[in-house]
Image: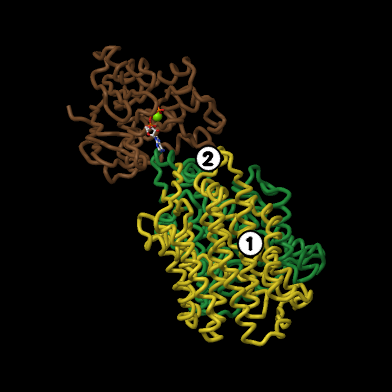
Amino acid sequence: MTALLEVRDVEARYGDALALSRISLEVAEQQTLAVIGANGAGKSTLLRCLAGLMPVSAGQIRFRGESLDRVPAHRRVAAGISLVPEGRRLFASLTVTDNLLVGAHQRRPGPWDLDAVFEALPLVAQRRDRYAGALSGGEQQAVAIGRALMANPELLLLDEVSLGLAPVVIKQVYEVLPAIKAAGTTVLVVEQDVRQALAVADEVHCLLEGRTTLTGPAGSVSQEEVARAYFGV
Amino acid sequence: MAHPVGVVRWTGASRVGPPLLLVVVVALAAGPFVVAPQQLFGLVNLFAYVMLAVTWNLLAGYGGMVSVGQQASIGLGAYAVAYLAQTVGLNGFLALPVAAVMAGVVAVPVSFLAFRLVGGYFAIGTWVVAEVFRLLTVQWDAVGAGSGTSITSLSGYDRDVRLALTYWVALAAAAVVVVGSVLLVRSRFGLGLAAVRDDPVAAASTGVGVTTAKRVVFVLAAAGAGLAGGVLALGSLRVQPDSVYSVQWTAFMVFMVVIGGVGTIEGPIVGAVVFFVLQQTLAHYGATYLIVLGVVAIAMVLLAPRGLWGLLAGSRGTTLFPVGYRAVLGRRS
Amino acid sequence: MDLTNAVLQGVLLGGLYAIFATGLSLVFGVMRIVNLAHGDFATLAAFVALVLVTGVGLPVWATLLVVVPVLALLGYAVQRLLLQRALSPSPLPVLLVTFALSIVIQNGLLEVFSSDQNRLRLGRLDTASLHVGAFALGVYPLLVFVVAVLILAGLALFLSRTRTGRAMRATSDDREAAQLAGVDHRHVYGVATALAFATVAVAGVLSGAQTSFTPSSGPSLLIFAFEVVIIGGLGNLWGSLAGGIVLGVAQNVGAWVDPAQQVLAGHLVFLLVLALRPQGLFGRAVPA
Ligand SMILES: Nc1ncnc2c1ncn2[C@@H]1O[C@H](COP(=O)(O)OP(=O)(O)OP(=O)(O)O)[C@@H](O)[C@H]1O
Ligand SMILES: [Mg+2]
C-alpha cells in the first residue's frame, strides 16, 4: 500500500523559534490518522504546513508521491488537500450557501455538492440562507467542514473541530465522519481530546513541543503510553 | 505577529552621533565666511529639506502615519512668517519660532479630524486639509490672495548680512529639529510609538496611550514642517499659495525618507543630502528628473526598504545615535 | 443658473464621482490598500482617449472599447508586479509605491502632452439638453449618470452572483481561509485591481468629455473619489452613489454661491461629515 501523504523530517519556524522539529509521518489511502498533543505542541503548525499556508524550513512533504515544495495553498486544494482550520474561519459576511460555494472554487469533481453536504450535515441545511457570522459555534463548525468537503478532497485535515463545543454538538459534528470515510477520503484529525481522537482513528501520532513522542496503531497504544507521550512525563 | 522591540544599544557607533553632529553644525556655521552667497541660499534650502525629511519620518517611520498633507504646515509656517513680518511688524527671524508654534497649534484640531481615518485614508484626509488651507489662503487678500506676497521688511539689513543671518537661523532650526527628534525617539514616547507602530493592539494593552502618542508626534511634526516653511519663506522672501501648499513637498519628503531609510534617525538626513545634490545637478531636466526620482523611490521600497542608511549600516543596524531600537518597513505577506 | 438647477446638475455630477469612488472602494474592500495614483490612472485613460480621438479619429464612445480593456490589463499588471510585492501588515510600502507612481504618471504625461488644458469633444452631444418643465438638463450628464448606475448595478451583480465575485468577497473577509478554499488570492487581487482600473478608465474618459483635464488633474480626482467614499460610508456600493450625489450637489451649490468656492464647498461638506458622522452618511461601521 502506498502512502497518500508522506512527511519527511519536516521542520517549521516562527522567526527563530522552532515549532516543528524533524517530524516524519505517513498516511495511507483511506486511513484515518489522529495527531494529538497538548497546547502548543505544534499540531496546527503541522496542518498549516500541509495546507501550504506556511513554508517548511527543512524536510519534505509529498502527496501521491509528488513534492509539495513549491505548490501554493490553492493548488494543494486542487490537488486534493483540504484543511478545516482551527477556529473555523468562515466568511462572516457571506451566507452559508455562499461559504459552501466558495469551498467548491476549484471545481474538483467528486461526490460532494450542495445537496450532498446539506444531506450529510443537517445543521448546515437548516441555516443555508443565514450569514455565517450569525451562526452558533456548532453550526459554524459544521459549515466549515461542509466548505472543505465541497472541494471534494482526497485528504481532509481537521484541526480541533471539537474545540469549544458542547458534547452533544461534538457528537453531531463527528457523526459526519463515517460518511466522509465512506466516500474514500483519507482523514487527518488533530485533537486535544485524546479519547475522541482514538475513537475515530486507525493510527495515532503524538506531538510534544514540536517533536514526535509516540506513533502507532490507535487500537494498540495503551493509555499510559499515550499519557506519557502527551505530557512528556 | 508581534515584532519584538529591541533593547537599548549603547554601541560604539551610537556614541559617535552627538559629538559628530556638534562638529558638523559648528563647521557649517562657518558657511557665510567661506561660500558664495548663491550657494548659501542653496544650503538654506538643504536645511529646510533636512527638517522636512526628519519630521516626515517621525510621522511615517515612527508614528506609522503616512501624511500627504504636510504642505499644510509648510504653507502655514511660510505665511505666518510673511504675515508677522509684513503686517504685524515682527522681525522676520523672530517670527520663525512663532510660526512653528502656530503650525503646531493648528495641528491639534486637525488631528482630531484626521485621526478618524487610518492608513491610506488618513493620507488623503491630510491632503484634503492642505487643500482647504490653500483654498482659504487664495481668498485672503491681506496676504496677496492667489498671487502671494513678498517679505520686504528685512530690507533694512545689508544683503550679505541678511543672507548670513538667514543661513544661521536655518542651520539652528535644522539642528533643533534633528536633536529634538532624537530626544523624542529616545524618550518614553518614542518607545511607546515604536510599540504603536509595530502592534497597536498590543501597545494599547500595555497601557501606552496610543492616540496621545500619535497626536504628540503629529503636532510636533507639524511644528517642524512649519519651521521649515518659515525658513523657506525667509530664504526666498516670497510666499505664493500654489507653491508653498504644493503636494510636491510631500513628494520630496517621501523621496528623501525612502532613499535615506525610513524609521531611522540618520536615514532622512542622508536622504535630504542626496536629494539636494540630485536636485542641484538634475533639476533642469524638469519632468524627466521627477520621473527618475519616482522610479528610484519605487525600486527602493521594493528592493531596499531600509534605504541607503540601511545598506550602509548593514545587517547589524549600526546607528550613530543611541535611540534604542531600529524600525523597519513591514514584512511582505 | 438657479439653485434648483444647480442641485440637479450636482446630482448628475454625483454619478460621475460615484464611478471614481467605486474603484477606490473596491480595492480597499478587497485588499485594504489605497492606491494614491487612482486619479492619475483616470487622467492617463483620458489622455489615451484623446490620442485615439485626435490621432485615429475614433468617436469618444468608441475609445472606451480600447481604453477600458487596456487599463484593466494595466491594473492587473500593476497589482501583480508592483503592489503585491509591497503588500505588508503596514500600509506604508503600498502608499509610498503608489504615491511615487502618481508622480511618475503625472510627469510622464507632462513630458508627452505639456501642461495645456485638454477636452474630449463630443460634437452635438456637448450642448444637447433636455427640457423638463422649467429645467434644462444636459443630455450628456444625464447619460453619464445612467452609465454610473449601470456600472454600480453590474458590479453588485458580479460580486453577488459570480464565482470570482464570491471569491473576492471571501478573500476580503479572510484571505487565508479563502486560500484554504482553493482561491488564488493574488489572482483575485489582480482581478479586483483590473476592475477598479476599468471603472477608473470609464470615469476618466467620461469626465474628460465633461470638464477639461491636464496631466496634473489626477490628485483632485483622487481627492473627490476619497471624499465620496467617506461621505457614502466605507464598503457600501450604493453608498458611493449617495456620497457622489452629496459631493456633486455640495460643489455645485458652492459654485452657485460663488464660482471660486466650488471645490472648497465640497471639501467643507466632507470635513463636516468626518467630524459629525465618521462612519459616513450611509455606512454602519466606523472606518477602520
Ligand atoms: N503566529 C505565531 N507566531 C509565533 N509563534 C507561534 C505562532 N503560532 C504558533 N506559535 C507557536 O508555535 C508553537 C506551536 O503552536 P501550534 O499552534 O502549532 O500548537 P497546537 O498544537 O496547535 O496548539 P493548540 O492545541 O493550542 O491549538 C507554540 O509554541 C506556539 O506558541
Ligand atoms: Mg492548534
Chain B: its colour in the image is yellow
- Same chain? Circles 1 and 2: yes
Number of marks in picture: 2
Chain C: its colour in the image is green
For label 1, count other residues whose C-alpha is less than 10 Å away and answer few (under 14), some (14-19) or many (20+).
Answer: many
In this rendering, the answer to whether B148 lies above or below A60 is below
User: In the figure, is residue B106 to the left or right of C51?
Assistant: right
Label 2 element class: helix
Query: Residue at point 47% right, 59% down?
Result: B262
Q: Amino acid at mark 2?
A: Ala
Chain at numbered mark 1: B
Q: Nearer the viewer, residue C277 or C168?
A: C277
Q: Position of residue B207 (x, y in %)?
A: 58, 39
Q: Position of residue A79 (x, y in %)?
A: 30, 39
- Residue highlighted by disc 1: B222
- Residue highlighted by disc 2: B202
Question: Ligand 2, what quadrant?
Answer: top left
Ranked by sequence position, the earlier of labels 1 and 2 is 2
Chain at numbered mark 2: B
Q: Position of residue C262 (x, y in %)?
A: 73, 67
For label 2, count other residues whose C-alpha is less than 10 Å away and answer few (under 14), some (14-19) or many (20+).
Answer: few
Q: Is residue A53 visible?
A: no
* Residue B161 image-quadrant placement: bottom right
Quadrant of the frame with the N terminus of chain C? bottom right
Q: Position of residue C134 (x, y in %)?
A: 82, 65
Q: Nearer the viewer, residue A69 or B92?
A: B92
In this rendering, the answer to whether B118 lies above or below B101 is above
Q: Which chain is brown?
A: A
Label 1 element class: helix
